[in-house]
Structures are given as structure tokens and as C-alpha cells.
Image (cartoon, helix red, strand yellow):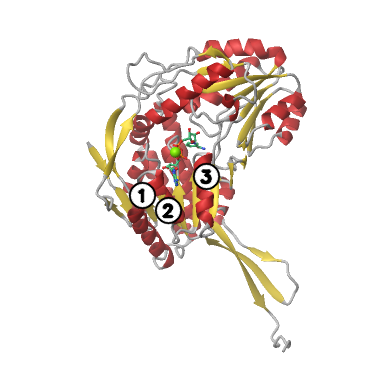
């Protein structure tokens, strides 16, 4: 059994407690590794290392171009090891191998993007009166505490680490307890890529025992979190004690909206892809499918027919389109929602655990229809392969239903009428809108939510901005004394 220690101050170390926790393959339910079980003492060590690297170790003083080169070297390492990383991600998370390969490529692209952006961050000269020069300078925010989920393990680590390092921050990152293996593999290359000791620390462990101490730690300047709304709220409360900067990327119940004039084949595929990709374990999953009444019946039928044929299977098989859910806990959560759904709406496809494999946390791709937008399966994030299909009669009603949710991460609109599509774009209260597509994510474009889906933006120049402070500098050009007193 391979043991994965954590990575603190440039070294791989056991936890202070000496404890380890098991990590599983969700397709076999077997333990595949043991990982150091970190707690507050380990967080202390990680934060002390990050503080030293930031305050006296010289990382913020390295030239931006050098930090950029470090990120590009990391990207190259990821690309050279795509096959091994994808396999590890696939085994540990249950996602299909083909999707895992996309994720690894996206993680490399994120390091490449911020590698290129590092030396393009500029300040401003502010247009104050002529007797002074006023500057605004960008400086790294300091030590960043970064807590990430299990649905895109290495990719989420890249979204957090790459902009922070480009900005000159030092990091204490905690991967999800379910999926820490790929980022611990990345840690093996940090030193070789030129990341000095203490600049990146990976503390492994559970939320309460290793995550919460990062958020509470007075040595941490900023917390970046991706995960559940419930934990997001706790993080915001805890971070208020030390007034840390906080960015949150939380859940969603994103509407995927189909007008009758949409390309029908594309619509059916887009509806399924929007909600079933990555087993539905996606913050932006199009889990509410709003369909115009005139195509509603035909669409539910076509979607169901196709959904029943989605190939579930062992994630390492290349033909597999849907693997198991990440964990026993998540599987039970989703199954509980299926029971709720059966009371609230009608089942068109799926509806239970996929038992044909004998083991593994497989759930059938499930489509509920005639769902009321007030139903629990339309309001609460399920984070599994479960779609709620809701009919609508006109554009105004589609907007009302789409926006009637506490969330606001993403939405998609399908129509050939550009006037209607653009009216929808403006009316939807969400951070990301796709037109005639759902889910493509570009490192060049901003990502983040409205409402209870959180705040702050990742990716693009917006993503690095969250790791920067702005310093105002005033240079007096009057040689005379002020003459006030
Ligand atoms: P979670 O929010 O508990 O876990 C996400 C990360 O936060 C993990 O690294 C975890 O260890 C950490 N964490 C947990 N409690 C913490 C605390 N008190 N302080 C600091 N860090 C803490 O999510 P979980 O329990 O894995 O999944 C529950 C639900 O959350 C899912 O069913 C889904 O609805 C939602 N979720 C949303 C995600 C998103 O991308 N927006 C990702 C993962 C889960
Ligand atoms: Mg949790």
C-alpha cells in the first residue's frame, strides 16, 4: 500500500500525530493508498513555512518573469506525465479516463496561462493634480489558504496555485480528503521546477481538523475555497475573526434552458452533457432543464432514450462515459435525493443505484420530469447524475423560473433566435452564461458565481487579481514645506 506523506517546507513529512487515512477507488470500493492525516499542528507548520517564504524567503521579490518560468516548467511536467496523472485521477475520483485526460490538460493549460500572465500585471499612474505623482501598485496578498473539493482534484489545485504563485503569494493548500493523490504527485516536481521550500505547502486531512485551522490561522492572509455552500458560510464566519480576504466558489442549481426553435439534436445532447458530465459532480451542472412546452414531451422522450444508453463502466475503460460517484457518502446522498425525487416528480430514466457491476458507487443517469421549481430536487444541489426537467410557456416565465433559486453560478440558453438568446443573457442572474452549449470552460475567461454561489472570480486576469493587494503611492513634487502649522 503506497503511503503519501504531506508536503511541508519542501519536504515530504508524516503528520505530527503519525496518523494516516485511507483513500479509495470508488469503482472497487477498495483502499488504494494511505495519506497523512493532518491536523492543526500540521497547519501550523505549513503556515510557518509559507510565512517565512513570503516574509523573509524572497519569493515575492523574485522577478515576475522568473515566477512565470517556474509555472511553465510545472506545466511541462504535467504535460509529460499526462497519462500517469490521468490514470491516478481516474482511479481515485471515478471519473472516466477520457474526462480525466481533459482535466490534466486543462490543469497544465492553467499553469501555462498564469506563467505567461505573471509579468504582465501592471500598476497605474493616477490622474491627480500636477503637484504630485500618484501610483497604484499591485502586490501579493501574502499567504493564501486554499481549500479544494474532490470533483476536479488536480484542476482545482491548478486554479488555486497558479494565479497565487504568479502573483508572488505563498500557499497552504488542502486537497479534499477523498482525492489528494494527484496534487501530492505534483508536489514531487515543485522543487525541480524551481519552487523554493515553503512557497507551496500541501496539508492533507479532513475539513474539520485540517481545513478549519487554515481558515482560522492568523498567519493566513486570504482564503480561497471551492466546495459546499454550508462550508462556505462557515469559512466566511471564521475568516471574519481575522478579516481575511475570502473568495468562495460554491454550489449551483444551474438552469439549462431550451426554446422550441433550438436545434433539436444539439438540444438533446446538450441537455445530457450539461448534467451528466463527470457523473453530475459539477458545480455548474445543468441540473434544472427548462424546456418550452411545445417541444417538452418530445424532448423528455429523446433525452430519456439516450440517457438509458449512456455507457456506465469502470472508469479506466476508454469506452466508459460515466463512472461511479466519488465516495460511499456521496453515493448515499444522491440515492437519498432519488427517493425524494420519486415522491416529488415522475421518473423518465434511471432512478436508482446501478447494480450490474456488483461493487462501486455507480448511480444510473436519472431524469425526473414534470418537476415543480419549488421541489427539493429543483432547489437543492444534488451533485450527482440527476436532472430535473421543468416545462415553461414563454420567455418571461423561463426567466422567472431560471432566476428563482438561491444560486447563481451558471446557465445555458438554446435558441436560434439571437435576439431572444441575448435578452436571456441579460436577464439571467448568474456568473456564467452559455449560448447553444453548456460547460466549456476557458482559462482566459472569468469563472464564479452570483448570489449564494459565492463571490470572487477565478481564471483569466480576474483570477490573479484576487491574489493581489493595491497599494496607493503618493509622491509629493512641491519642494516647499506644507505651511499648515
Ligand atoms: P465540502 O464543502 O464539505 O468539502 C470541500 C472541501 O472543504 C474539502 O477539502 C473539505 O475537506 C473542506 N472542508 C469541509 N469542512 C470544512 C471546514 N469546516 N472548514 C474548512 N474546510 C472544510 O463538500 P463535501 O462534503 O465533499 O460535499 C457535499 C456537497 O457539497 C456536495 O454534495 C455538493 O453539493 C457540494 N460540493 C460542491 C462543490 C463545488 O464545486 N461547488 C465541490 C464539492 C462539493
Ligand atoms: Mg462536507
In the rendered image, which quarter contains the C terminus? bottom right
Kindly tell me whether residue 337 is visible in this rendering.
yes
Label 2 Cα crowd, 10 Å radius (few <14 / some 14-19 / many 20+): many
Does residue 295 sit above or below 89 in this rendering?
Answer: above
Q: In the picture, residue 125 is in which quadrant?
A: bottom right
In space, the residues marked 3 and 1 are separated at their CA atoms by 19 Å
Q: Residue 159 in the image: x percent, y percent? A: 48, 44
Q: How far across and how far down the image is residue 376, in percent?
A: 58, 26
**Quadrant position of ligand 2:** top left
Identify the residue shown where x is 63% and y is 13%: 299
Residue of label 2:
214
Contact flag, marks 1 and 2 (Cβ < 8 Å): yes
For residue 203, which numbered disc appears in the image? 1
- Say few, some or many: other residues with alpha carbon within 10 Å of mark 3 (under 14 / 14 to 19 / 20 or more): many
In front: 104, or 26? Answer: 26
Indicate whether 443 appears above or below 130: above
Q: CA distance from mark 1 to mark 2?
A: 9 Å
Amino acid at each position: 500500500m503506497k503511503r503519501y506523506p504531506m508536503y511541508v517546507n519542501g519536504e515530504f513529512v508524516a503528520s505530527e500525530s503519525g496518523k494516516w487515512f485511507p483513500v479509495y477507488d470508488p469503482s472497487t470500493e477498495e483502499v488504494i493508498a494511505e495519506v497523512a492525516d493532518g491536523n492543526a499542528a500540521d497547519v501550523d507548520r505549513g503556515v510557518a513555512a509559507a510565512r517565512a517564504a513570503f516574509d523573509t524567503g524572497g519569493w515575492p521579490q523574485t522577478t515576475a518573469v522568473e515566477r512565470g518560468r517556474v509555472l511553465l516548467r510545472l506545466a511541462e511536467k504535467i504535460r509529460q506525465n499526462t497519462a500517469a496523472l490521468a490514470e491516478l485521477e481516474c482511479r481515485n475520483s471515478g471519473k472516466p479516463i477520457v474526462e480525466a485526460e481533459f482535466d490534466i490538460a486543462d490543469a497544465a493549460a492553467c499553469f501555462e496561462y498564469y506563467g505567461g500572465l505573471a509579468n504582465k500585471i501592471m500598476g497605474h499612474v493616477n490622474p491627480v493634480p500636477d503637484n504630485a505623482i500618484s501610483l497604484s501598485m499591485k502586490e501579493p496578498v501574502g499567504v493564501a489558504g486554499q481549500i479544494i473539493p474532490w470533483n476536479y482534484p488536480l484542476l482545482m489545485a491548478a486554479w488555486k496555485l497558479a494565479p497565487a504563485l504568479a502573483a508572488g503569494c505563498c500557499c497552504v493548500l488542502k486537497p479534499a480528503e477523498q482525492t489528494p493523490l494527484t496534487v501530492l504527485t505534483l508536489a514531487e516536481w515543485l522543487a525541480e521546477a524551481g519552487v523554493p521550500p515553503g512557497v507551496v505547502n500541501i496539508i492533507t486531512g479532513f475539513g474539520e481538523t485540517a481545513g478549519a485551522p487554515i481558515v482560522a490561522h492568523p498567519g493566513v492572509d486570504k482564503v480561497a475555497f471551492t466546495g459546499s455552500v454550508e462550508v462556505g458560510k462557515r469559512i466566511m464566519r471564521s475568516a471574519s475573526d481575522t478579516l481575511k480576504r475570502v473568495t468562495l466558489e460554491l454550489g449551483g442549481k444551474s438552469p439549462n434552458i431550451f426554446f422550441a426553435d433550438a436545434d433539436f439534436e444539439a438540444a438533446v445532447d446538450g441537455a445530457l452533457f450539461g448534467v451528466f458530465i463527470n457523473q453530475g459532480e459539477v458545480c455548474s451542472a445543468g441540473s434544472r432543464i427548462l424546456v418550452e412546452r411545445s417541444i417538452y414531451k418530445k424532448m423528455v422522450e429523446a433525452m430519456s432514450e439516450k440517457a438509458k444508453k449512456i455507457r456506465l463502466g469502470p472508469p479506466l475503460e476508454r469506452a466508459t462515459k460515466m463512472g461511479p460517484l466519488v465516495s460511499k457518502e456521496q453515493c448515499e446522498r444522491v440515492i437519498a435525493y432519488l427517493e425524494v425525487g420519486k415522491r416529488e416528480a415522475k421518473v423518465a430514466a434511471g432512478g436508482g443505484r446501478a447494480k450490474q457491476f456488483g461493487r462501486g458507487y455507480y448511480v444510473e443517469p436519472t431524469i425526473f420530469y414534470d418537476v415543480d421549481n419549488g421541489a427539493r430536487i429543483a432547489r437543492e444541489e444534488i451533485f450527482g447524475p440527476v436532472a430535473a426537467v421543468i416545462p415553461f410557456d414563454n420567455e418571461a416565465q423561463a426567466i422567472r423560473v431560471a432566476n428563482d433559486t438561491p444560486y447563481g453560478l451558471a446557465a445555458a440558453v438554446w435558441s436560434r433566435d439571437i435576439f431572444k438568446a441575448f435578452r436571456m443573457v441579460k436577464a439571467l442572474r448568474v456568473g456564467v452564461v452559455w449560448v447553444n452549449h453548456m460547460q466549456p470552460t476557458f482559462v482566459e475567461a472569468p469563472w464564479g458565481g452570483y448570489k449564494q454561489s459565492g463571490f470572487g472570480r477565478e481564471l483569466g486576469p480576474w483570477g490573479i487579481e484576487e491574489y493581489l493587494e493595491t497599494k496607493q503611492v503618493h509622491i509629493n513634487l512641491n519642494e516647499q514645506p506644507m505651511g499648515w502649522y
